[in-house]
Image (cartoon, rainbow, N blue to C red):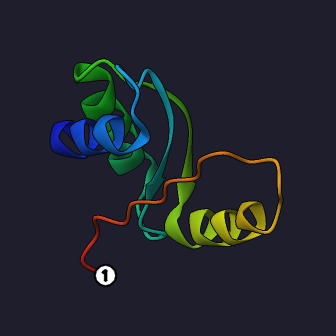
C-alpha cells in the first residue's frame, strides 16, 4: 500500500494522499476488510469507506462519464 500511495501522489501531483476509498476482493470478510483498513492507516491514510472491487470498477466507469470530475484512480492489487 505504501508503494501505491507514492505512485498515486506522483501521478496526481499531490504532496500527500490523506483520504481514500479502498476496494477489496468481493469475497473478503469483515476481518480481512478491517486488516486492510488498518494497513492503510499505518501509512497515514484515513479510510473513508471500503467497497468491493466490482463496485469500484462500476463506480469508476460511471464517474468517467461525467465531465466535472478531475481524478479517479482505481487500483486492483488482488490476484483473483
Q: In this picture, is 2 found above or below 45?
A: below
Residue at the (39%, 60%) spot, across then down = 75
User: How many marks can you see?
Assistant: 1
Screen quadrant of the C terminus = bottom left
Residue furthest out toward the bottom: 80
Q: Which quarter of the rendered picture does the N terminus lie within? A: top left
For the point 40% across and 61% down, which residue is it?
Answer: 28
Q: Is residue 80 left or right of residue 60?
A: left
- Examine the rendered structure and indicate whether residue 40 appears above or below residue 36: above
Q: Residue at x 36, y 44 (%)?
A: 31
Q: Nearer the viewer, residue 25 or 59?
A: 59
Q: Please name the residue that numbered disc 1 is placed on.
A: 80
| Residue 7 picture location, percent across and down | 25, 45
Q: Is residue 36 left or right of residue 19?
A: left
What residue do we see at 82% from left, 48% from top? 68
Q: Position of residue 50 (x, y in %)?
A: 53, 45
Few, some or many residues within 10 Å of mark 1 (<14, 14–19, 20+): few
Closer-to-camera residue (31/15): 15
Instruction: Kindly state the secondary structure of the residue where label 1 is placed.
Output: loop
Residue 13 pos. (x, y %): 39, 33
Q: Is residue 50 left or right of residue 65?
A: left
Q: Quadrant of residue 36?
A: top left
Residue in front for this viewpoint, 43 or 4: 4
For this view, does 56 lie left or right of residue 67?
A: left
Q: Residue furthest left?
A: 3
- Could you tell me residue 17's position as x and y percent? 40, 26
Amino acid at each position: 500500500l505504501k508503494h501505491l500511495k507514492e505512485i498515486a501522489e506522483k501521478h496526481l501531483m499531490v504532496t500527500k494522499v490523506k483520504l481514500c476509498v479502498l476496494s477489496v476482493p468481493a469475497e473478503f470478510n469483515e476481518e480481512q476488510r478491517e486488516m486492510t483498513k488498518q494497513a492503510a492507516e499505518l501509512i497515514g491514510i484515513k479510510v473513508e469507506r471500503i467497497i468491493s472491487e466490482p463496485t469500484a470498477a462500476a463506480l469508476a466507469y460511471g464517474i468517467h462519464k461525467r465531465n466535472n470530475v478531475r481524478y479517479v484512480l482505481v487500483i486492483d492489487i488482488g490476484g483473483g
